[in-house]
Structures are given as structure tokens and as C-alpha cells.
Amino acid sequence: MVNPVRKGRVGAGIVKTSKREKLTRSAAPSSADEGRGKKRRFLRRAQDTEPLEVQDQSLPTASGVSNPRPSSRRVEKLTIAIDGPSGAGKSTVARSLARRLGYVYIDTGAMYRSLAFRVKEGGISPEDELALNPLALSLRIQFVTEGEQTRVLCEGEDISEAIRTPEISRLASSISKQKSVREALVRMQREMGKEGGVVLEGRDIGTVVFPDADVKFYLDAESDERIRRRYDEMVEKGVRVGLKETQEELLQRDHNDMHRTHSPLKRATDAVFIDSTHRTVEEVVEEMVRVIKERIKSDE
Ligand code: DC
């Protein structure tokens, strides 16, 4: 059972937020082996922005069993899917977009990571599907969003930092190839997003979890940039990690996530492709908002 908790949300509509976003990196290009002192900040503070003015409009009923919606639902309750590889900036962008829209942000990678954390704790092999299945089914995760931060609680325990280590990244990728694990977590994700008004990010949101999502994005960046971002993120968090190790981990994970049998990472045919390599988070979010507005207009 997963329960998104959003403190400070005003009703279920679109709200204006007064807090500034804490973002991640600089947009100018640089080689992956630059020292920490030289690193640019892709992560930077976005400007406060106006919310979308899209009240009281109806959309046609979406088809499909995964996320049935009543025809009377409002446009402010859209389902937005963001997929892409590690380090493309999905989390930062998705969080920022959700704040902009007054939506719930759902980090599905954190769910695989939480399960990986429990797998590690229980000394379970990532190949042992028989042991993984009940663990996945009994997983209790809460996302608690307060201001700029989203904390991840697993059975009430705050594991937000513990799930961001390279070891848990590898383990999450490894267990995510198991069919029964995916089925359990996808069910939770559909439950969380069924009312709409959500921004979900992951690897299979637009292809499997919500194939009828209202707007889909595929966010990517050049691999050197993605490696550098991931490395900077780890260093910032005080995780002791080398650039070479980060590179190997990220490329291996890309390979695993793109080539697994069940729900591999791929761009949905109707997803809007965005390359974040030389862009700030704010620029990417702006482009997404523009696409969403256009979509709303064309549905009117
Ligand atoms: O987005 P992330 O790096 O936190 O995800 C960690 C791993 O979880 C990723 O390598 C693959 C897996 N994952 C997945 O298989 N499907 C998703 N929707 C999200 C993450």
C-alpha cells in the first residue's frame, strides 16, 4: 500500500506555491572528469512561476483499464508521465513540474529502491523471486512532501537517504527485472495515480503503468552529462564514490533497464522527447508546461 501525503496542499486543484524550488545542476557543457570545484550547477533555483490557469474544463473520457476516468474530470487532474534513463534530471524536473501544477509527485524509482533496501536488510538474493514477491506485496511506502523535500517512509521509517547509495541503485535495478516485483509495484502506482492530478516519473510510466496518460515525456541527456550529474549528486550527499565507479554503475544500469524482458525502458511512441543536456531545470519545466497547455487547448 502506498500513500502519497502532501502537506500544505490547497484542496485538489492547482495552487500557487510561494516557495522556491531547490534544483540541481548547471546547463553549460563540461567533461565528466571536471573537478568538484569547477562543476557547474545544473541544479539551480527556479523562479517562482504562475500556476496554469486551467480551471473548470472537462476532458473526454480516457480509455483503458489502467486508469479509468469519469468524463466529468477536470483538466487540472491530468496524469503526466515522465520516463527516461538515470541522470536525465527526471526527479528534479518532475518535482518542480508537480509543484508548478499543484499535483502529487510520485517517484516510482524510490519504490523500487525501497524494496531493494528491504531486500538488502533481509539478506535476500535479488534473483530469489519466491522471496521477493511477498516482500513486494507487503511493502508499505509513504511519500511525504513538505516544501521542497519529498521524504520516503517505509513502514514509517524514513529511508530517504539510505536508498540513494550506489549499492541500492544497483540492487533496485536488479530486482526490477523480476515480473512479480513489477506487477506488485505497478499495481500500487496505478492506485496512487488513479484520481489524476499526478506527475509520475520512472522507466515504464508511459508504456505500462499509465499507457493512457494525458501527457507523456521522455527525458534524456548525453551520457557524459548524466554521469557527471549523478557523480555531483553523490558527492553533495557525502557518499564516497569515484567518477569511474559512477560511470560504470550508471551505464550498467542503463543497459539492465533497457534490455530486461519485462517493461524495459523505452520511449512511448506518443511521448514528447526532451534533451536536458544543455538546459536548466527551469527551461525543461517551461517546455513541459508549454506542451501541457497545448494539449489542453487541443482537447477543448
Ligand atoms: O529512477 P531511479 O534511478 O531511482 O530508479 C532506480 C531503479 O529502479 C532503476 O534503475 C530501475 C528501477 N525502476 C524501474 O524499473 N521502473 C520504474 N518505473 C522506476 C525505476
Image (tube, rainbow, N blue to C red):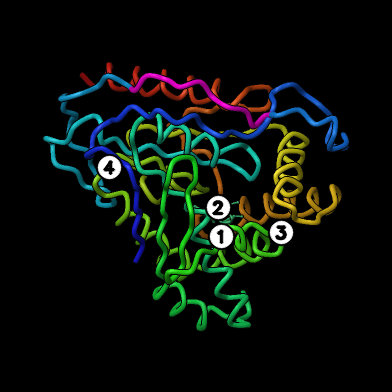
- Which element is circle 4 on? loop
Please say if 207 is above or below 116. Answer: above
Q: Are marks 2 and 1 in contact (CB under 8 Å)?
A: yes
Q: CA distance from mark 2 to mark 1?
A: 6 Å
State yes or no: Cβ of the residue under disc 3 lies below 8 Å from any atom of ligand 1.
Answer: no
| Residue 33, quarter of the rendered image | top right
Please identify the quadrant where the N terminus is shown: bottom left
Residue 45 shown in magenta: yes
Marking on residue 261: 1
The residue drawn where x is 32% and y is 21% is 52
Marking on residue 166: 3
Q: CA distance from mark 1 to mark 4?
A: 29 Å
Q: Nearer the viewer, residue 38 or 270?
A: 38
Residue 212 shown in magenta: no
The residue wearing badge 2 is: 264
Residue span colored magenta: 42-51
Instruction: Please report whichever mark, 4 or 3, sits nearer to the chain's N-terminal start.
Output: 3
Residue 181: give x, y in percent of width and height.
48, 68
Residue type highlighted by circle 2: Pro
Residue 178: give x, y in percent of width and height.
53, 68
- Which element is circle 2 on? loop
Of tags 2 and 3, which is closer to the observer?
3
Residue type highlighted by circle 1: Thr
The residue wearing badge 4 is: 196
